[in-house]
Image (cartoon, rainbow, N blue to C red):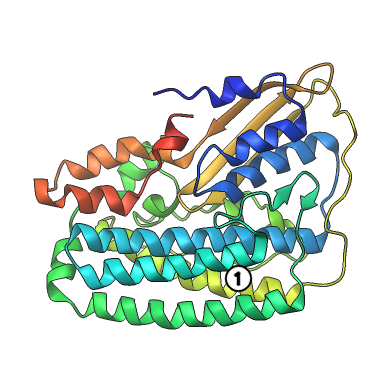
Amino acid sequence: THRGMEKRMEGLTAAEGLVVAERICGICSVAHGLGYAEAVEQIGGVEVGERARLIRTIALELERLYNHIGDIGNVCAGAAFHYGTATGARLKESLQQLNERLTGHRFLRNLVVLGGVAFDLPMALQDDLAATLGETLAGFDSLVARMEANPSLVDRLDTTGLLSHRAALDLAVAGVAARASGVDRDARRDHPHAAFALPEPLALNVITRTEGDTMARVMVRVGEVRESIRLIGECVRRLAPGPLRVDLPEVLPGGRIGLAAIESPRGAAVHWLRTDSGGRIERYHLRSPSYANWPAVALAAESAIVPDFPLVNKSFELCYSCTDR
């Protein structure tokens, strides 16, 4: 089905467009909201403050965390490893309850606004964040250890759903799927945004594997969960007093183009828009990572037996909503 999100944007003001962008995907609200906001901020010629950039990055990595941990649990479900499924769901739920305490929304919606963020992160919430992430990491490490110690699970994941390095490049695969096939590509480093674009940017360890199978995609997520927790801690340590929001022009300049690429949990989400003579949105385009990656699922599934298709599908964990934008 075609949802008509791009057409819906035409004629909207910048503020109205943000409401639509955040709802392109239910579980990537921060990534899509941030991509749209950074494109608009380019057109408006404004520079978001450091504190706001750091808070945006904390939200972006929290979104990656609950998605990746939930995705690993879903892969376990495909192999009937019920402990992994239940533990992944429990850890994801804990993170989403944290999201609600931080922003008032389990999916972190309405945090990103044009020019900055809507909510601050006071010390009490910083302590809550640190405590919850500490508990999450301990539970997650235990889950991974049990997965690696389960020979039947490892046997189901190893060499299942192979995607070669060459195929990943030819299909322009994005995100975890690309990095698990040896493609060293991450928009946080290659197209810096949020705190990755500060004068002293966050240092990012890009997690890659070369095997290109379901196990590799799981292990890239494992590494990225740990890296996201480290990045959030670094953002909190760097928080200094500063404005949460800067004002954009009341009417955006006409005939301007804005472009942003944000590393969502599934890969680079690319947002492009152009304003008309009155400063409203004349044309908007989104290239979601799920849209780019669906052909790779079909290719990877060719070598899999029928009972392993759920493993292949869940190891990519693509979004129908983003694809049918």
Q: Is residue 247 left or right of residue 102?
A: right
Q: Quadrant of the N terminus?
A: top left
Q: Residue at x 72, y 31 (%)?
A: 16
Q: Residue at x 82, y 23 (%)?
A: 279
Residue 284 position (above or below residue 195): above
Residue 11 position (above or below residue 93): above
In the figure, residue 128 lies in which quadrant? bottom right
Q: Residue at x 62, y 60 (%)?
A: 59
Residue 120 position (above or below residue 212): below
**Nearer-the-camera pick, 102 or 308:** 102
Image location of residue 57, percent across then percent down = 66, 60
Q: Residues within 10 Å of mark 1 (few under 14, many from 20)?
A: many
Q: Residue at x 77, y 27 (%)?
A: 13
The number of numbered discs placed on residues in the rendered structure image is 1
Residue 210 visible at all: no
Single out the residue that lies furthest toward the top: 277
Q: Is residue 162 left or right of residue 192?
A: left
In the figure, residue 108 lies in which quadrant? bottom right
Q: Is residue 200 left or right of residue 153?
A: right
- Amino acid type shown at disc 1: Leu
Image location of residue 157, percent across then percent down = 20, 62
In the figure, residue 11 lies in which quadrant? top right
Image location of residue 250, percent across then percent down = 90, 32
Image location of residue 120, percent across then percent down = 77, 64
**Nearer-the-camera pick, 311 or 209:** 311
Residue 299 visible at all: yes
| Local SS, label 1 | helix
The residue beneath circle 1 is 231
